[in-house]
Amino acid sequence: MKGNAELLARTDMIVAAGGGERDVAVDAAILTNKPKSANPEAFLNERLMSDLRPTLFLAQLSNLLAGNISIVHGVTGSSRTFMGEEAAGVDAVRVALARIEAGQSELALVGGSHNGEREDLLLLYDAGGHMLHAPFQPVWERRSGMVLGSLGAFLVLEARGHAEARNAKPLARLARVLSERSARPPGAVSAALTRMWQTLTPHGARAGMAVISGATGAQPATNEERAWLKSLAEVPVRATGSRVGHGLEPQFSMNIALATLALGREKLFPPADSSGVEREYEGPLERVAVTAVGHWRGEGMALVEAVT
Amino acid sequence: MAAAGGNNGRPVVVVTGMGVITSLGAGKAENWTKLTAGESGIHRITRFPNEGLKTTIAGSVDFVPVEPFCSTELGERMATMVAEEAIGESGIGSKSDFPGPLFLAVAPVEIEWPHRDVLAAGSGANDTVGYGDLWRASASGRFRAIHERCQFASVAEHLAERFGTKGSPISVSTACSSGASAIQLGVEAIRRGEADAALCIGTDGSVNAESLIRFSLLSALSTANDPPQAAAKPFSKNRDGFVMAEGAAALVLESYAAATARGAKILGVLAGCGEMADSFHRTRSSPDGKAIIGCIRNAIADAGLTPDDIDYINPHGTGTPENDKMEYLGVSSVFGERARSIPISSNKSMVGHTLSAAGTVEAVFTLLTLQHQRLPPTINYKVPDPAIPLDVVPNTARDAKVRHALSNSFGFGGQNVSLLMSREPA
């Protein structure tokens, strides 16, 4: 697709994104000097008028990631940005797939990116009590807490007939994407995962199946996901948060991309866990369920299948 | 009106409930009365001091109190109010049980200055304050509410919980076309057969010092502060920028079949949606108008109509020199000679630019225009721009026959969305 203006001009884009970075030095100088000022609010106006940089604050618009993709790559069929942490990442893929299945779209670019080293975001998740403080541990070995990761992942989703007509090689089949929400009374996460799993695997077949989990380490969500995974005893599990950290919006599209790569190699990548949730698996790989349980809200699941 | 199957055999999407808040007031009745009377909601900002600012006016919604002020909180409260109005009018579902998904256009959520001030005070730092101090305070467990308030998902989450919408709520941002995108997502979901109904809301409470200063530094805002009511001058030769404003609007969308089956009153039809992204520049349209032209044409084609069918245009019409020039190029390219005679009036001349909410607010106003067969004016039109020869319904409302109307929304990041609304199902 790269450089193919005709294809890119009818590619539908859904980006899942948060906001852009702030100039933390400007913020710190204001916070230091504002209380000492005779008129703190006038001081804030004055500093912002002189210190804000248009190039930086434009990037704080969530949709400017999509805007830059349009400019750099020429993707212009449509452009939508979903906001809302992990759930936005799930719904971006779900809606892109639904549009293709319904004939509203033939070709889509979907995904996002995340910078995990922003002080303003680290403190926000810490305010919610969701961060792991040192030392580092894999997701399933933690009592509680996320480790943020910097990562980006985009998927090209395409109607099979459209892909075959242009001789593009299908890498995997995205069979289904589901999402749910609740205010998360105790047990709601496990129940949602159970419901979605039953929808994705109606006949209960688990041979050649693995789970790539987006577990964050935040609680109680991760404990509920761990309890649900125990009910799938023989299905191998991998939590990518243990290896690359948690990237919020794009974690789900990244995990679908990793599932696709594993299916293409017919081999699951090794475990990173000594708690017993993840175990060695050398068997065949035909289908991968990708989970996404948001650190605060939102539950999702995708089924990715090897192309036959 | 055998419209259940509609264009291309897909469900026809109708509107059965609407709610709106702007600086003119709360609710459809007050807004429509003032809008057709040519009243302006733009006023001097009193929410924060205006020392050192080039622009000191806005269409802020000061009658919904939020103390201490928080833009996301105001956005959520206005969204709640318009959703109650829209659901109440439609009579759909039951209390806290809306039978469909939520699509919300909302401004990107940020940690705001009052949050930083609280964390700075809580850190106990006495000489210099850095992010390390804020972080230390945040990790104390005393500021959990800031985490929840500043999640991008939080407004939609609270609305979904309150109104009992179904499934995962979607918060969309396409900058100043977000409100139209939320409606477009709802239309598409109903057309796919995923739902018989959708709740589409746009809301924006962004008039705080930093947001105002950002737009000011981009030279996007009018600086004609005196008198405030005369600042927004879309399509005028002396237009000098948009006026920042707040507001919210909600639409209950339903499939025609579901609405008629329950005997709901149909307020209008969401007949078509068009979109085309621009790859030219982050804040400017391609000089050839390609994406704007394509977007309008896509909406008309999506509705199964032709340009000759369009009786009225509710433009993006911000009153910036650039937008109005490019929108004229787009409209004149699509409609040709007819462009001079199709009435096109900018609500933003009266309510300002409600940013993320604008597409939804203006969709409600367009549907009210169809319902009342009366065109709200473009006020402050004293100095026509000879380069923009359009019938802008200057200064005074007038009656007209309107079957099909187009509403444009354009945003930073190359976003362009057009909605086509009709009075009755085709």
Image (cartoon, coloured by chain):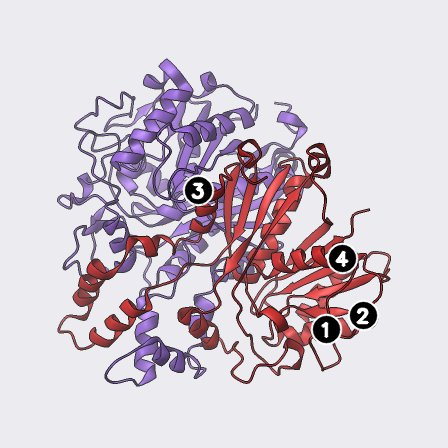
Determine which residue is flagged by label 4. A265
Marks 1 and 3, how far apart at CA: 39 Å
SS label for mark 4: helix
Determine which residue is flagged by label 3. A71
Say which mark, if any, is on residue A281: 2
SS label for mark 3: helix
Sequence order check, earlier mark of 4 and 2: 4
Please say whether residue B259 is visible from this viewpoint: yes
Sequence order check, earlier mark of 3 and 4: 3
Chain ID for purple: B
- Labelled pair 1, 3 in contact (Cβ < 8 Å): no
Query: Label 3 is found on which chain of the structure?
Result: A
Mark 1 is on which residue type? Pro
Chain ID for red: A
The image quarter containing residue A152 is: bottom right
Answer left or right for B54 relative to B396.
left
Marks 3 and 4, how far apart at CA: 34 Å
Marks 2 and 1, how far apart at CA: 8 Å
Mark 4 is on which residue type? Arg
Sequence order check, earlier mark of 4 and 1: 4
Which residue is painted at 44% across and 50% down in the image? A63
Nearer the observer: mark 4 or 2; the answer is 4
The image quarter containing residue B62 is: bottom left
- Labelled pair 3, 2 in contact (Cβ < 8 Å): no
**Dot 4, crowdedness within 10 Å: few (<14), some or many (≥20)?**
few
Answer left or right for A256 relative to A200.
left
Sequence order check, earlier mark of 1 and 3: 3
The x, y position of residue B165, in whole percent, is 58, 54
Determine which residue is flagged by label 1. A271
